[in-house]
């Protein structure tokens, strides 16, 4: 079994990952960490996350909590991630980054980490999100000077970053491939797992709308765990979801 360590274990995505692992015969939860300020430090995972039987103790020390794992999954937030990097550099484990909106400085450190271990970072681990990106590359732009593009993204009210990492990536792809600056509209409401919609309006008042709705976070979890199953056999390097799963 592949021993998994989850950093950010009691966040919304962390909980879903741990529930998935708990019902798996391929993976074993071997480490789970939270921030020092988290009230659940020292408690068993099973007493904090509903529907989970694993008795791993929640730790606030990444260096200790992740020391015996095969793969580390970071699903914290961009501020916490930057603080975690020093520990990852010491551990030298395969690393899956499910944290979005990482700043440029942290991105540079990650690139250097890839010189010692395999790293996979993605703004969205949903398989259909990859298809959405490929669709963008196939759109024919007749008159980019008169093309308006709008990105609408909706997530639950507890999501910290805004705009989402996926929306920012879509905006960059649109600029790189079409030369058009897209406007992003972010909505935080309810418990929406993820919704992204791209609207194109051309000079003929034609409208093209492409959308992706993630009903639950399990769609992200499937992608993350597929990456975990493959990254342990990868050479050191910096990989995207497409690289690891051969989705190009």
Image (cartoon, helix red, strand yellow):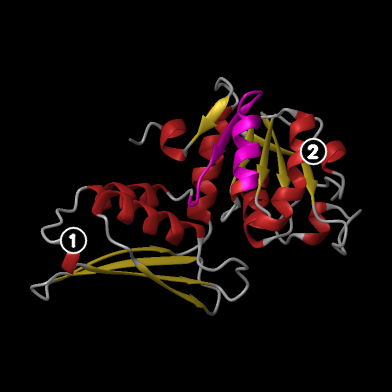
Viewport quadrant of the N terminus: top right
Front residue of 214/206: it is 206
Indicate yes or no whether the magenta region holds residue 107: yes
132 w.r.t. 29: above or below: below
Q: In the current view of this chain or complex, which residue is farthest to the bottom?
A: 189
Give the alpha-carbon distance from disc 1 to disc 2, as whole Å: 46 Å
Label disc, if present, on residue 144 of the rendered structure: 1
Residue 200: % across, % down: 22, 67
Indicate yes or no whether the magenta region holds residue 159: no
Residue 68: % across, % down: 80, 30
Q: Residues within 10 Å of mark 1 (few under 14, many from 20)?
A: some
Q: Secondary structure at mark 1?
A: helix
Name the residue located 66 percent from the left edge and 23 percent from the top edge.
116
97 w.r.t. 219: above or below: above
Name the residue located 65 percent from the left edge and 45 percent from the top edge.
106
Front residue of 3/93: it is 93
Q: Is residue 8 visible?
A: no
Label 2 sits on residue = 87
Residue 222: % across, % down: 51, 46
The stretch in magenta equals 105-124
Q: In the current view of this chain or complex, which residue is farthest to the right?
A: 42
131 w.r.t. 234: above or below: below
């Amino acid at each position: 079994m592949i021993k998994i360590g989850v950093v950010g274990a009691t966040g919304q995505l962390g909980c879903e990952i741990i529930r998935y692992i708990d019902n798996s015969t391929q993976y074993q939860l071997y480490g789970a960490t939270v921030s020092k300020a988290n009230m659940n430090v020292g408690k068993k995972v099973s007493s904090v996350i509903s529907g989970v039987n694993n008795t791993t103790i929640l730790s606030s020390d990444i260096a200790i909590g992740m020391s015996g794992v095969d793969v580390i999954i970071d699903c914290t937030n961009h501020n916490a991630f930057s603080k975690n990097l020093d520990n990852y550099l010491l551990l030298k484990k395969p690393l899956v980054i499910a944290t979005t909106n990482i700043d440029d400085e942290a991105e540079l450190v990650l690139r250097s980490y890839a010189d010692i271990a395999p790293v996979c970072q993605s703004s969205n681990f949903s398989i259909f999100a990859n298809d959405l990106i490929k669709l963008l590359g196939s759109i024919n732009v007749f008159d980019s000077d008169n093309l308006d593009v709008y990105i609408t993204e909706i997530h639950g009210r507890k999501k910290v970053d805004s705009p989402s990492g996926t929306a920012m990536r879509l905006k960059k792809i649109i600029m790189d491939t079409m030369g058009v600056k897209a406007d992003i509209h972010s909505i935080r409401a309810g418990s929406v797992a993820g919704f992204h919609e791209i609207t194109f309006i051309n000079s003929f008042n034609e409208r093209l709308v492409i959308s992706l709705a993630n009903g639950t976070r399990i769609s992200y979890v499937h992608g993350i765990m597929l990456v975990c199953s493959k990254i342990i056999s990868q050479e050191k390097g910096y990989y995207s979801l497409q690289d690891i799963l051969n989705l190009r």
